[in-house]
Image (cartoon, grey):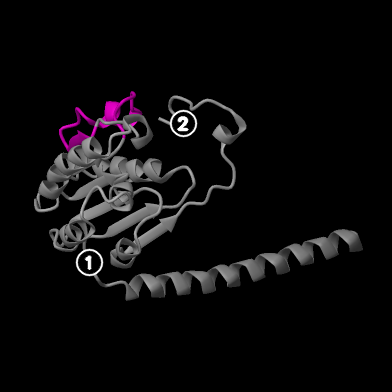
Amino acid sequence: MSKTKSNKQDNKEERNKRHKKAMQRKKEHVDSRIAEATVDKGLLVVLTGNGKGKSSSAFGMLARSVGHGLHCGVVQFIKGLWECGEQILFEDNPLVEFHVMKTGFTWETQDREKDIAAAEKTWERAARLLTDETFNVVILDELTYMLTYGYLDKSMVLEALQNRPPMQHVVVTGRNAARELIELADTVSEIADSKHAFNAGIKVQKGIDY
């Protein structure tokens, strides 16, 4: 073996040794963190921010939950005037109860009183799910807007979330999540808007945007 090849082999072996030691340390750290996580409870997850993917993430968790055989409830605020892929997929699933506000976006209705009435009626369905321990997972899609616009009483919503069954998981989506909601949550992900096709004049796309 030439000296050059020998040096390359030695460097490769040394790099592999360093990698193995680093991965061993990482495994010890991860195993330690897993061992320390002893609390078992229903989670409140808030997906907020101006970026795309909040509802998509929530429905990804819904798909995962259904895959595990969990009983799920979905309440979609604001949306409902156009065909929604998530609703098509899940509304006939026996493990999923699906409710949609069906008013469209607020800039389409342009009627605050009508929007408030629709929000309150839709919230009644959400509130029922939040008191039913047979529902393992509840998705409250676009709920944050109902609080931001003042369509629903914030303290009423927060109280319902806080007093839900102990093992029930809830996922809330929407921009500008209220500070109190973020404080109450167990997990908060803020999705940033780095770049969006719509801002370049590209139409919303079936399967990607709805």
Residue drawn at (47%, 42%), measured in percent from left and top?
A: 52
Horizontal side, residue 93 vs residue 83: left or right:
left
Q: Amino acid at mark 2?
A: Ile
- Measured along the vertical axis of the image, is residue 23 above or below residue 209? below
**What's the CA distance linking mark 2 and mark 1?**
34 Å
- Residue 190: x and y, percent? 45, 56
Check disc 2: other Cα within 10 Å, few if <14, some if 14-19, many if 20+: few
Q: Quadrant of residue 94?
A: top left
In this rendering, the label closer to the viewer, 2 or 1 = 2
Residue appearing at x 24%, y 71% in the figure = 39
Sooner in the amino-acid sequence: mark 2 or mark 1: 1
Q: Position of residue 59 (x, y in %)?
A: 33, 41
- Examine the rendered structure and indicate whether residue 83 appears above or below residue 45: above
**Crowd rating for badge 1 (residues with CA inside 10 Å; few <14, some 14–19, many 20+):** few
Q: Is residue 17 above or below residue 102?
A: below
The label shown at residue 40 is: 1
